[in-house]
Image (spheres, helix red, strand yellow):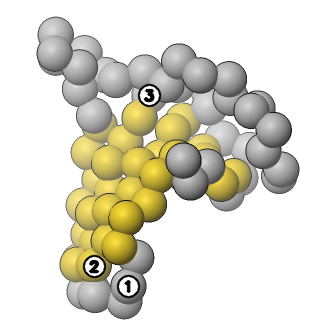
């Protein structure tokens, strides 16, 4: 995994691509444990909540402090 803290509330769980032109990331809200998907392409981007098979927000169930540094 590519866990990286950005601030006290959110951390980046996953990153794919990441060049200037495009990339995908998954972010976790540490207060709600909800996961978000971010896609960037050039100067545009979009953010959406990830959903489970029941249509509810996908929650991050692992340890929020799993040895990560601030």
Q: Position of residue 2 (x, y in %)?
A: 56, 54
- Nearer the viewer's eye, disc 3 or disc 2? 2
Q: Nearer the viewer, residue 26 or 8?
A: 26
Q: Nearer the viewer, residue 1 or 36?
A: 1
Judge whether 36 appears above or below 18 on screen: above
Q: Is residue 69 left or right of residue 7?
A: right
Q: CA distance from mark 3 to mark 2?
A: 23 Å
Q: Is residue 27 left or right of residue 11?
A: left
State if disc 2 and disc 3 touch (CB < 8 Å): no
Q: Mark 2 — residue?
A: 22
Task: Say few, some or many: other residues with alpha carbon within 10 Å of mark 3 (under 14 / 14 to 19 / 20 or more).
Answer: some
* Disc on res. 34: 3
Query: Is residue 32 something that shows in the picture?
Result: no
Q: Position of residue 59 (x, y in %)?
A: 43, 21
Q: Quadrant of residue 51?
A: top left
Number of callouts? 3
Q: Position of residue 22 (x, y in %)?
A: 27, 79
Q: Nearer the viewer, residue 66 or 59?
A: 66
Q: Mark 1 — residue?
A: 19
């Amino acid at each position: 995994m590519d866990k990286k803290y950005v601030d006290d509330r959110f951390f980046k769980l996953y990153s794919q691509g990441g060049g200037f032109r495009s990339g995908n990331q998954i972010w976790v809200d540490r207060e709600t444990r909800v996961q978000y998907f971010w896609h960037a392409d050039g100067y545009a981007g979009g953010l959406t909540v990830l959903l489970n098979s029941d249509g509810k927000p996908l929650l991050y169930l692992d340890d929020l402090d799993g040895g990560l540094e601030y």
